Image (cartoon, rainbow, N blue to C red):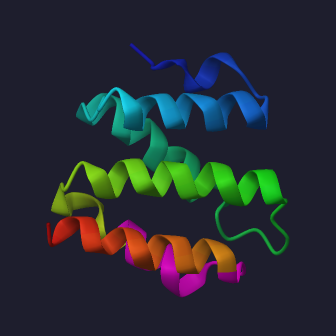
């Protein structure tokens, strides 16, 4: 039973869906596992568009807001391996959600 991320390839719609996950606090593992798959597919591309940076940032924010420590290794991997400084900065900031 896949969440609706797979219903669209449009990056703006995917970003909007990620925002909705955060606003509605939809932190069920089956939803977050889709975000993990999506992040792993492309966060480390050599060149990320502004829209892609925003999309991956929201995906990472949703994982961090869940406060599930299962996602910490992936978030740290994004910080270590992304080629985009803005995305790195966002995700570093999201790690603070684990402390609150």
- When the figure is inspected, residue 29 is found, relative to residue 42, above or below; the finding is above
The percent position of residue 78, horizontal first and vertical second, equals: 51, 73
Tell whether position 14 is magenta. Answer: no
Horizontal arrangement in the rendering, residue 9 relative to residue 24 (left or right): right
Q: Residue at x 64, y 38 (%)?
A: 15
**Quarter location, residue 44:** bottom right
Q: Residue at x 76, y 37 (%)?
A: 11
Along the line of sight, which residue is nearer the eye, 85 or 23?
A: 23
The percent position of residue 71, horizontal first and vertical second, equals: 29, 60
Outermost left residue: 100
- When the figure is inspected, residue 79 is found, relative to residue 8, above or below; the finding is below
The percent position of residue 58, horizontal first and vertical second, equals: 53, 50
- What span is in magenta? 74-85
Q: Main secondary structure of the magenta part?
A: helix
Horizontal arrangement in the rendering, residue 48 relative to residue 81 (left or right): right
Horizontal arrangement in the rendering, residue 24 relative to residue 68 (left or right): right
Q: Number of labelled discs? A: 0
The percent position of residue 55, horizontal first and vertical second, equals: 64, 48
Which quadrant of the figure contains the N terminus? top left
- When the figure is inspected, residue 31 is found, relative to residue 54, above or below; the finding is above
Along the line of sight, which residue is nearer the eye, 23 or 2?
A: 23
Tell whether position 78 is magenta. Answer: yes
Horizontal arrangement in the rendering, residue 10 relative to residue 39 (left or right): right
Along the line of sight, which residue is nearer the eye, 30 or 84?
A: 84
Which quadrant of the figure contains the C terminus? bottom left
- When the figure is inspected, residue 68 is found, relative to residue 20, above or below; the finding is below
């Amino acid at each position: 039973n896949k969440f609706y991320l797979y219903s669209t390839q449009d990056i703006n719609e995917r970003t909007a869906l990620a925002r909705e996950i955060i606003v509605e606090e939809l932190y069920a593992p089956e939803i977050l596992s889709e975000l993990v798959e999506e992040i792993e597919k492309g966060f480390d591309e050599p060149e990320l568009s502004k829209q892609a940076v925003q999309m991956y940032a929201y995906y990472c924010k949703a994982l961090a807001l869940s406060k599930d420590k299962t996602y910490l290794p992936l978030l740290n991997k994004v910080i270590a391996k992304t080629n985009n400084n803005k995305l790195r900065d966002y995700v570093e900031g999201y790690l603070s959600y684990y402390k609150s």
